[in-house]
Each structure stands twice: as C-alpha cells, then as structure tokens.
Image (tube, helix red, strand yellow):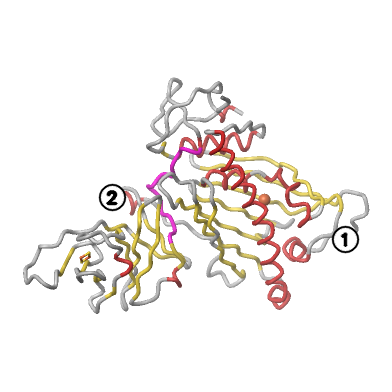
Amino acid sequence: MLVEEAKGKQADGSNTPHYDLRQIDCDPNFWYPVAWSHKVRPGKTFAARYAGHPIALIRPEYGSVYALEDRCAHRQVPLSKGVVDDKGCVKCCYHGWAFDRAGKCVTVPYLNKEGVGRPVKSYPCREKSGLIFIFPGDPALADKVPVPDVAQVGNPEYKTRMFSPRLKCHYTFMHENLMDMNHQFLHRRQMGSITARFLGQDKGDDFLEARYSFARKGGNQPLAEALIFGKHHDYEDREQPVEEVVSIRTTYPYQTLQIHDKDGDLIMDLWTSYVPLGETQQVTQAFGLLSVKKPKWNFLLNLAWPALGIFTHRIFEEDREIVEMEQNAWRELGGDHNVEVFPVVKSLRALLARSGVPNKYAHPVETASKSEDAA
Ligand code: FES
Ligand SMILES: [Fe+2]
C-alpha cells in the first residue's frame, strides 16, 4: 500500500510512527468558529458541534455569548433546548436545572439546597468578525493563542460575503484543494481555459504560502472574474497574462487566498476555517468570508454581487464534488493512496500532519518516504 504520510505531533525524529493524513485530527488548541454571530440571538441558545462534542452557545439578553457542553449534567439532554433566564443562565428544558457561564449548576429548582447539581464543561468563547469561536483544547492555553483576523471584515473599502458549506470530507482535503491551483482544468466550464503559473512559496513551522499567476489561453472571461481581476481584452489565440498574483496560505489551522493587483493592492481576500463536526473528522463545517475591494464606482460591485455569488458557488460546488469523491475513495480503499507530485502540496501535507494529532483510530502505517517536506 502506497502511503506517504508524515508524522503526527508526537513524532520527534527519524524512527517515529507515520500516520495516514486522513486520520490526523485538528489540533484542538486553536480557536475554531462554530457559528455565525447573527444566528445566536439575545436571550437564545444555539446548538453547535466540534469533532463529536456537542456545544451549546448561549447569548444572554445582556452580556457576551458563552459556550457549554451541550449536555445537561442531570440526564444529558441538550442544554441548547433550554431557555435563558434573566440572570443569563441557561435552564435545562427538562427539570429546569440552571447553569451559569462557567458551567456551574446554580439552581435545582425542586430542591432548596445549594451545590446539589453537578457542573457541565465550559469552553473559552470569543466573538469576532461576525463569528463565534470556541477553544476546544486546554482552556489554560486559550489566552495565549490569538483569535484570528478574518478577511477584511469591518473594512469599509471592501464588501464581504459569508458562506458556510458543510462537506462530507476530512478537512485536509480542503486545504489541499485550495492550495493546489493546478486543478483549473476542473473549472474549465466556469473559467474557460486558464492555467496557473507557480511563482514561488514560503514556509515555516506553522505556515505555507504558495503564489501563482494565471494566463488565459482561450474562452470568455466571466463577468464576475472580470470584476475581480479587471477586464482583459483580446483573447485571440495568444496567451493573455493576468498580472494579478494569487497567494494561498495555510496558517495552521486556517487558510487564506489573497489576490493582489499589479500595483500590489489587495483586491480580494478570502479567509476560511475548516471545522470538524464528527469524531472521526470526516465531515467538515467550513466557515468562509470573501472580501472584495470596492471599485471606484461601487454600484458596479453591487450590481455584479449576485453574479459573483453564483460564480463562486459554481466553482465551489465543483470542488465539493471532487473532495467528497476523494473521501469516498479513501473509505473504499481503506486509506490514503495519494501519489503527490507537486512539491507545494507535499509540503502542505507535511505541515498538516505535524500540526495535527493522530486520532484514536489511527495506527502507524508503513511508509517509504521519510518526509514529504524534503521536496
Ligand atoms: S435533564 Fe436537565 S434538568 Fe433534568
Ligand atoms: Fe477549485
């Protein structure tokens, strides 16, 4: 079996175990978005999930949102089915036990005694850029890890679109898909004949960035693409270089795609986070924000906004079909048979493998390659 995985987090040298990349869990010691802010209204609860852990988000009428394990300490029914009381506590829908933001049970209404009910786990919780983040790992580390900056949210020079598709695949397929611009062939119906040119990469312990430019060999430039890149005339048979530079970066565990124009101005800024839903992390809830620089005549962007949405949606649906097929192949073959040839993706796979944590079902696999990062 050809498996060429790099090491998991516990690995420290040459004789370390290697794991199938699709059995490497996300490192929980980061901030992960679990809901859009606007979905959690004042005085309401919301059911979210991280890697098999049910999470109840609670927003009191006054005060900040908080996150608890979504299981009542009494009979484990979801606290997200409960109600928020006037003290900002969540009351379980069954017997009315009330829990505060630290997860402490403050009331068992039918027993007039303090300290009867057991607590539930609470998660560090922050709100930023229209997203609610939780820290699923060691709470003691939460304050040391920054909540990420998200695209150009709040910058009046940009218009931002939000999207949150759910994908039936491991999060690592998503990182590979976006980083690897050599798959424009897949998108030929949406974008015509466009080819990527690899310009270079930078990498470090926790990041990898690849830069590309594009050349159009034929086909019509879609309206939405013209709006982002600017209109490129004269498609004849000659290659038309597009001078914009596309930079794709995985800064573990997040991913960004930025487009700078020939003057170095940031004209498009995409931020995504891939959040595992199930315990085996083979279903991913993505949260994405796409910021587009407003042109001089802003109404043009407003006019083209729906077209831009359809354009990006179609491209995304093509990617979704592909990554879900990759996941199915992994399942059917019982492992990862990826024969990677592109050095950037080899480096990315190594980054994801060393940054994550082998899950409890992972077992060491035989491998011929010492390190994918050698490329
Ligand atoms: S199950 Fe929650 S109060 Fe009884
Ligand atoms: Fe794609």
Determine the residue positioned at 71% across, 63% down: 311
Determine the residue positioned at 19% across, 68% down: 97
The residue at which mark 2 appears reads as: 140
Q: Quadrant of residue 1?
A: top right
Q: Secondary structure at mark 1?
A: loop
Report the span colored magenta. Answer: 22-34
Q: Are marks 1 and 2 in contact (CB under 8 Å)?
A: no
Residue 312 x/y as whole percent: 67, 61
Distance Cα–Cα, label 1 vs label 2: 56 Å
Q: Is residue 95 left or right of residue 129?
A: left
Query: Between residues 189 and 37, which one lies in front from this camera angle?
Result: 189
> Residue extending furthest left?
113
Asked if the stretch drawn in magenta spans residue 324, the answer is no
> Residue extending furthest front?
332
Residue 157 x/y as whole percent: 62, 70
The residue at which mark 1 appears reads as: 233
Q: Secondary structure at mark 2?
A: helix
Q: Amino acid at mark 1?
A: His
Q: Amino acid at mark 2?
A: Ala
